[in-house]
């Protein structure tokens, strides 16, 4: 069988397929559908320092070839995760990664410090697409200066593998990626959702309560591929690609563009078994092509 292991920081993943934050809950919600231990990793839903109620309904809308969401990081806070969720999932034989969000640098740092102590959580994914309340709501990840500040602060506090999730709502994502690499990130994941909106023509009003929301699904894949390819040209750290991956062919395209691993997101809502199917189909692809190691296709398109 081909070798599908992937190394990110000092972590070795058994295969390159992870589930994307916000689309897979805490993993246990999918127990009836697939063997969670078969996954390369699970990135749990966005976790903040304090509980968040999220945005008012409606906060999801179907769009052509995709969906909009404006859930607003609803969660019960990091202490709830540590006390109630972690004991139930810590025995999984896959990497559990916590997506960390916040509204101020101190929020991120304190959340990361709390997660340091969890033996079965070897990494966090820092979501820097969140609004920085001290800068008028501008997302941390939309300027090199603020991206560097937050990643550097968390890097100083967090001792394990640090993955930084990049926002696509920027002019030059390659520069942001270089900045977070310089600040100490072990890897970058991209892309997060694109800003979009939907309107009900009959009611003549926006569908989402927040008017705008995050666009995901197959409609964003060409943009995500382009951004992964661009970032792969300027950073030395591994890239985890995501954005519209619906099958193994999509995942392989991201690897050819420069991603060492991938995250499956919106597809989980359509087919809850899709992640393990993609793992098997990647193995079949490598075997059919006579490729012994997954790393041999990463960035192959040049």
Image (cartoon, grey):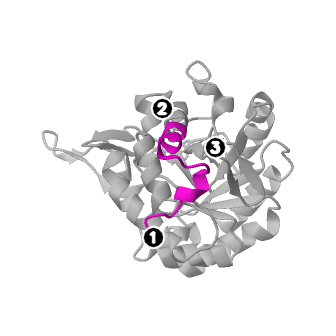
What secondary structure is found at the residue carrying circle 3? loop
Residue 285 percent coordinates (x, y): 48, 41
Give the mark toward the camera: 1 or 2: 1
Estimate how packed mark 3 is, as few (under 14), some (14 to 19) or many (20 or more) residues with alpha carbons within 10 Å.
many
- The CA distance from mark 3 to mark 2 is 14 Å
Quarter of the image where one finds residue 53:
top right
Given residues 144 and 257, the one toward you in this image is 257
x 54%, y 50%: residue: 262
Residue 302: mark in rendering: 1
Evaluate whether residue 146 shows in this view.
Answer: no
Residue 15 percent coordinates (x, y): 63, 43
- The CA distance from mark 1 to mark 2 is 28 Å
Evaluate whether residue 228 shows in this view.
Answer: yes
Residue 149 percent coordinates (x, y): 66, 76
Mark closer to the chain start, 3 or 2: 3
Residue 139 within the magenta-colored segment of the rendering: no
| Span of residues in magenta | 282-302
Q: Is residue 242 above or below residue 66?
A: below
In the displayed structure, does residue 22 sit left or right of residue 149? left
Q: According to the image, label 2 marks what residue?
A: 274
Give the mark toward the camera: 3 or 2: 3
Give the mark toward the camera: 1 or 3: 1
Q: Quarter of the image containing the C terminus?
A: bottom left
What secondary structure is found at the residue carrying circle 2? helix
Given residues 250 and 299, the one toward you in this image is 299
Q: According to the image, label 3 marks what residue?
A: 15
Mark closer to the chain start, 1 or 3: 3
Given residues 142 and 208, the one toward you in this image is 142
Estimate how packed mark 2 is, as few (under 14), some (14 to 19) or many (20 or more) residues with alpha carbons within 10 Å.
many
């Amino acid at each position: 069988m081909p070798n599908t292991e992937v190394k990110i920081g000092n972590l070795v993943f058994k295969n390159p397929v992870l589930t994307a934050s916000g689309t897979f809950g805490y993993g246990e919600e999918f127990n009836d559908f697939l063997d969670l231990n078969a996954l390369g990793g699970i990135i749990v839903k966005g976790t903040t320092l304090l509980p968040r109620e999220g945005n008012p309904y409606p906060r999801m809308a179907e769009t052509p070839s995709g969906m909009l969401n404006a859930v607003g990081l609803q969660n019960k806070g990091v202490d709830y995760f540590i006390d109630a969720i972690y004991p139930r999932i810590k025995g999984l034989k896959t990497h559990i990664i916590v997506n960390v969000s916040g509204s101020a640098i101190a929020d991120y740092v304190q959340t990361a410090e709390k997660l340091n102590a969890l033996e079965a959580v070897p990494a966090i994914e820092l979501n820097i697409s969140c609004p920085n309340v001290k800068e008028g709501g501008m997302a941390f990840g939309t300027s090199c200066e603020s991206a560097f500040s937050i990643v550097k602060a968390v890097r100083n506090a967090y001792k394990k593998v640090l993955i930084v999730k990049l926002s696509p709502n920027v002019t030059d994502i390659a520069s942001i990626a270089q900045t977070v690499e310089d600040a100490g990130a072990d890897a970058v994941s991209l892309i997060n959702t694109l800003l979009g909106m939907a309107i009900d023509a009959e009611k003549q009003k926006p569908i989402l309560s927040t008017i705008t929301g995050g666009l995901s699904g197959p409609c964003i894949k060409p943009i995500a591929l382009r951004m992964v390819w661009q970032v792969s040209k300027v950073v030395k750290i591994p890239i985890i690609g995501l954005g519209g991956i619906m099958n193994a062919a999509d995942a392989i395209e991201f690897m050819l563009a420069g991603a060492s691993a991938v995250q499956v997101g919106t597809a989980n809502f359509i087919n809850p078994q899709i992640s393990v199917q993609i793992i098997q189909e990647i193995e079949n692809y490598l075997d059919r092509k006579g490729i012994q190691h997954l790393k041999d296709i990463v960035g192959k398109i040049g």
